Image (tube, rainbow, N blue to C red):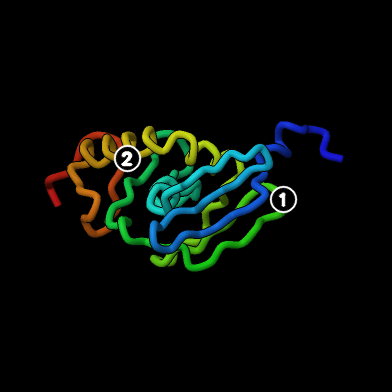
C-alpha cells in the first residue's frame, strides 16, 4: 500500500508516444489526459547537461524542433528515462515533472522563447553551449 495516495494518483495508467504529433500522451485513472511535446521534454531535460549543477548554470538548447524519442524506459515506479534521437539519454523525468509539463505547456513554451531571446539564438539554430546567464564574450 502506497503511504501517499496523492503521489499514486500522479502515476499514469497509460502512456502513448505519438510519432506524428511528436508528443507523449499520459492518461490518468481520473480520466485526465496530458500531452507533452517531445521538444519541451528535450529542451527542459532535468539532466545536468541541460540544467547544470546549480542555479544559473542552465544551457539553452537549440536545434531540437525535430528531435524524437527513440526509446522510453521506466525507472522504478517514479520516472521515465527517454533516449532522444540526438543521443541525449541522461534525464530522468519524474511523474510530477511530466504532469507539470503537460499541464503547463504554454508556460514552458514561453520560458523557452524567453531563453532563446535572451541568448540571441533561434529555435532551429545548431546546438552550441549557450548559457542562460547574461553577457557574451566577443574577444574569441
Check disc 1 and report the residue beneath it: 77
N-terminal label among 1 and 2: 1
Distance between the alpha carbons at the discs numbered 1 and 2? 29 Å
Tag 1 near tag 2, CB within 8 Å:
no
Nearest the eye: 114 or 59: 114
* Left or right of residue 26, residue 109 in this image: left
Total labels drawn: 2
Please state the horizontal and vertical placement of residue 73, each as a whole percent of the image: 61, 62
The label number, if any, that marks residue 93 in the structure image:
none
Residue 88 point in image, percent of width and height: 45, 61
Label 2 neighbour load within 10 Å: few <14, some 14-19, many 20+? some
Instruction: Find numbered disc 1 in the image and state the secondary structure of the residue it sits on.
Output: loop
Viewer-nearest residue: 28 or 87 = 28
Q: Quadrant of residue 5?
A: top right
| Image disc number at residue 112 | 2
Q: Position of residue 43 (x, y in %)?
A: 38, 49
Q: Residue at x 39, y 57 (%)?
A: 21
Residue under the image location 43 percent in, 67 percent down: 87
Q: Residue furthest left?
A: 139
Amino acid at each position: 500500500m502506497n503511504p501517499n495516495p496523492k503521489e499514486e494518483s500522479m502515476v499514469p495508467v497509460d502512456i502513448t508516444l505519438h510519432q506524428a504529433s511528436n508528443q507523449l500522451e499520459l492518461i490518468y485513472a481520473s480520466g485526465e489526459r496530458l500531452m507533452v511535446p517531445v521538444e519541451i521534454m528535450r529542451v527542459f531535460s532535468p539532466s545536468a547537461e541541460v540544467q547544470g549543477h546549480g542555479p544559473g548554470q542552465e544551457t539553452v538548447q537549440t536545434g531540437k524542433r525535430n528531435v524524437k524519442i527513440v526509446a522510453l524506459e521506466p525507472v522504478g515506479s517514479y520516472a521515465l528515462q527517454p533516449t532522444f534521437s540526438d543521443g541525449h539519454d541522461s534525464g530522468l523525468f519524474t511523474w510530477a515533472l511530466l504532469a507539470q509539463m503537460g499541464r503547463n505547456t504554454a508556460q514552458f513554451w514561453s520560458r523557452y522563447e524567453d531563453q532563446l531571446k535572451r541568448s540571441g539564438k533561434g529555435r532551429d539554430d545548431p546546438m552550441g553551449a549557450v548559457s542562460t546567464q547574461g553577457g557574451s564574450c566577443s574577444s574569441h
